[in-house]
Image (tube, rainbow, N blue to C red):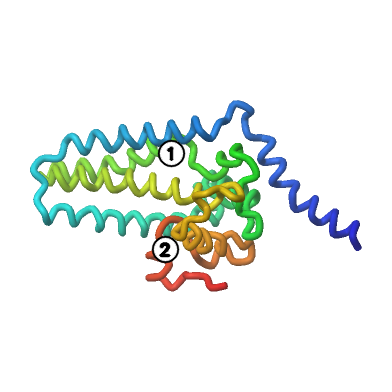
Amino acid sequence: MAAVAHATTAAARAPREAIVEAIPGGYRCARHLAGLFGEVALFMAVPAALLRDVRPWEWLLVPAALVFANAVEWLVHRGPLHHPTRARLLYQRHTLTHHAVFSHDTMAMRSWREARVVLFPLFALPLLQLVVVPPFALLWALGARNAACLFSLSATFYYLLYEVLHLAYHLPEGHPASRLRLVRALGRHHQRHHDPRRMTEGNFNVSIPLCDWLAGSLLKD
């Protein structure tokens, strides 16, 4: 019986070990985070510099854009991240890689190398900017300069929020940030999603579970 249990455990570890071993030897989480924050600073500095005399009501565009981003996060996570559509790269990276490394009972990174299967690759944010450009250009052409800039700022900020919070849920055991009340609460929400039996049912918001609440896709213990 013990031998069977040992074999089962080893088999369960195999995908994780294989994925981690395939991470390039030169990968460094600190370098990745430095690149991420550098990109965010660049992509937020440009629209911030273009803002002119923002009126009080225009600031309301920020929470509206963040709610929109939350809905996009929910839809993409519920869709291509968990279903092998034409965008199979997303499914491969998320379901077949990220969920293979982290299950609901093994959420913590064993080493900082595993951050590579938590954080998006650094080319993801520039790609996001390509998605932001059309609505930015449309708003600018309509004379809504500040709306265009605030939309771009909000999209980039939400991306950073997603990355930071997602990394916080998978921090190594005992990391001080993992004991913060907000991180523990949101991390528990994300942990339920990592149950292989339930990952296609709910808790698709990785950041703030607003759309999970609105759509009735909150998973309970």
Q: Residues within 10 Å of mark 1 (few under 14, many from 20)?
A: few
Horizontal and vertical percent for residue 69?
34, 54
**Whether residue 79 is visible:** no
Label 1 is placed on what type of residue? Ala
Dot 1 corresponds to which residue?
Answer: 124
Q: Quarter holding the N terminus?
A: bottom right
Q: Horizontally, is 26 left or right of 128 in the view?
A: right
Q: Residues within 10 Å of mark 2 (few under 14, many from 20)?
A: some
Count of marks placed on residues:
2
The image shows residue 125, relative to residue 101, as above or below, that is above
Horizontal and vertical percent for residue 67?
31, 59
**SS state under label 1:** helix
**Whether residue 209 is visible:** yes
Q: Quarter holding the C terminus?
A: bottom right
Residue in the picture at 38% in, 65% down: 210
Residue in the picture at 60% in, 37% down: 113
The image shows residue 122, relative to residue 65, as above or below, that is above
Nearer-the-camera pick, 75 or 32: 32
- What's the mark number on residue 209? 2
The image shows residue 84, relative to residue 204, as above or below, that is above
Horizontal and vertical percent for residue 197?
63, 66
**SS state under label 2:** loop
Residue in the picture at 25% in, 34% down: 45
